Amino acid sequence: MDIAVIFQRLTESFVINIELFGMTLLFGLPLGLVIAFGSMSKWQPFEWLPGKLKRPDGKRWKKIISILVGAIAKWRPISWLTKIIVWIVRGTPLMLQVVIIFYVPSIIAVSKGLPSPWGSGRLLATGIAFIINYACYFSEIYRGGIESIHGGQNEAGQVLGMTRSQIFFKVTLLQVVKRIVPPMGNEIITLIKDTSLARIIANKEIIMMAQEYSAKGLIWPLFSTALFFLVFVGILTLALNWSERRLSYFR
Amino acid sequence: MKVLEVKGIQKNFGSLRVLKGIDFDLERGEALAIIGSSGSGKTTLLRCLNFLESPDQGTISVNGKTIFDASERLSLKSDEIRHNRLYFGLVFQNFNLFPQYTTLQNVTLAPQLLAKEREDYKGNRAAIFKELELNARDILAQMGLTDKLDFYPHQLSGGQQQRVAIARALALSPDILCFDEPTSALDPELTGEVLKVISSLAEKRTTMIIVTHEMQFAREVSDRVIFMDDGVIVEQGAPEQVFGNPREERTRQFLARYSG
Ligand SMILES: Nc1ncnc2c1ncn2[C@@H]1O[C@H](COP(=O)(O)OP(=O)(O)OP(=O)(O)O)[C@@H](O)[C@H]1O
Ligand SMILES: [Mg+2]
C-alpha cells in the first residue's frame, strides 16, 4: 500500500487525538480551578453547634458526644465532598471512566426503549470523561500552587484595602501560574498520550487506525505513530519552555 | 482630638490569652514606639488595629469615630472592614512586596484599584492614574528610590525592599502608619537606611506606631513609648522616662537585657 496514503490516514486520525486534547484543556483547566476552590472551601455550616448544645443542667456531656459534636462543628461539607470526588476519579482507571460514561447512560436509555444519548457522539462521551478526570488532577496542582503562596501576600493586599477577588486576580494568580507551569506541563504531556485510550469505545484515533493495518499484517504504521506523538510533545515542550521564560522576570 | 483611641482590647487564640485588655491613644503627629519581649503580643495588637485579627473585646476609634466594637463585630460587612483598614497602614517585618510588580507598580497598584470606586473614575481614568503615579514617584523619591522605579523586588536589597513597602503604605495616606519590627529581617548594615527613612517621617510628624527591638532608635524617634509584657501595657511614658528612669520592675528587667 502507498506510504503517502497511510500517512494521510494516520494524520487524519491524529486529529481526533488533538481534538480530545484541546477539549480536555479548554474545559478541564477552568473546571480544575473550580474543584480546587471546592477542596479549599472552609465553609463550616455547623460551627455554632457546640455553643448551642449546652446541657440544661450545666453538666458536661459524655465524652463520646462532645467528640462527635466537635467533629460535626469542624465538618467542611464542600471540601469533604470535593475531596471524595477527587479520590474516586483519581483512584480509578481513566479507561474505565470512559467506558462508564459511554455505556451507563446508553444502557439506561435502551432499557427504557430510548436511543442512546450519545448517538454518534463517541468523542463527546470520551471528552467528558477526560475533562472530569484531568480536572481532578489539575485541581490538585492548582491547590498546591495556591497554598504555596505566602500568606503575607494575601495580608499585604488586605491591608492595602483590596477586595478578595482583587487580591486573587491582581496578586496571587500570576504567582500561582508561575509555580504550576512545570507540573501542569507534565500533566499536559501525559494527556496527549492518554488520548489514545479513546479507542476503548471505538473512536478512530491514531493507534486504532494503525492497528487496522497491523491486523492486515502491516506492522510499521503502528510503530510510526510514535513520530506523531514525539513531534506534538516537542512542540508542547517548546511552548512550555517559552511560558516559563516569559514568567522568569520575577521570583 | 485623638486620632486613635484603643479601649480594652482583648484577644485570645483558643485558650491562650494574648492581649489582656489594652488601652492607649494617639495624638495626630505623634510617634509611638512599642517595645516588649518576644510573645508579649505586639504583633497581635498591630494585626488587630489592621483588622487582620478580630479582637474578642474592646473598641477602636479613629478621629472620634468608633470603627470597631467587639460587641457588634458580626454586623460589620466585609466592605466596611476593608474601608476601615484604610485608616491604618502596615509595614510588615518581611516586606511582603508583590514580586511580579516593579517598585512603581507595587506602590500604585492599590491606589489604582481604589480609584475605581471613585465617582469621577469613568472618563477621568487617565488623569487619575497620572496623578497617582506622580504621587507614587514623589513618595519613592522621599524614600531615595528614584533610580529603582523599574526594578522588581528580587532585584532590590532588603533595605530597599522595605523602603518600597513603606512607600506602598504611604501612598494610601493612612491616618496611622504601623510598623512591625521593620528592620528585624535585615542585615545589620541595612537597618540604618530604613531607620533613617522612618526618622524622616517622624520629623514630618507622620502619625506612627512602631513595634521595634531597636531600643536606641525607639528612644530617639518616638514621642512616647509603651512597654508591653504578657499581653498588658506595663508602662508608658516619654522615652526619657521609660528608658532613663523606668517606674516598673518588669521594664527595668527587660531593658537590662538589652543594655547588657
Ligand atoms: N494565629 C495565632 N494562633 C495562635 N497563637 C498565636 C497566633 N498568633 C500569635 N499567637 C501567639 O500569641 C502570642 C503573642 O504573639 P505576638 O506575635 O503578638 O508576639 P510579639 O510580641 O509580636 O513577639 P515578637 O517580638 O517575637 O514578634 C505568642 O505566644 C504567639 O505564639
Ligand atoms: Mg512580633
Image: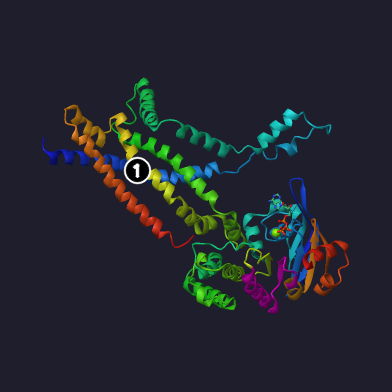
Residue B195 sits inside the magenta stretch = yes
User: Relative to the observer, which residue lies in front, B195 or B62?
Assistant: B195
Tell me what residue is drawn at x 63 percent, y 55 percent: B78
Q: Which residue bears the numbered disc 1?
A: A23
For residue A160, side relative to residue B4 (left or right):
left
Residue A61 higher or lower than B90, as above or below: above
Left or right: A228, with A243 as reference point:
left
List x then y, in percent, for residue A2.
11, 38
Q: Quadrant of the N terminus of chain A?
A: top left
Quarter holding residue A205: top left
| Residue at the far left in the pictured view | A2
- Write the start and end of the magenta stretch as one range: B188-216
Q: Depth check: B94 or A5 in front?
A: B94
Quadrant holding ligand 1? Answer: bottom right
Classify B56 as above or below B171. above
- Label 1 sits on what residue type? Met
Quarter of image, res B33 = bottom right
Residue under mark 1: which chain is it in? Answer: A
x and y, in percent, of residue B204 in the image = 68, 79
Q: Is residue A204 visible?
A: no
Above or below, A40 against B225 in this view is above
Point out the residue furthest to the front here: B260
Mark 1 CB within 8 Å of ligand 1: no
What residue lies at 37% left-to-right and 54% top-to-bottom? Answer: A241
Query: How many numbered tags mark residues here?
Result: 1
| Residue A96 visible in the displayed image | yes
Label 1 environment density (alpha carbons within 10 Å; few <14, some 14–19, many ≥20): some
For label 1, the SS is helix
Please, what is the dominant secondary structure of the magenta stretch? helix
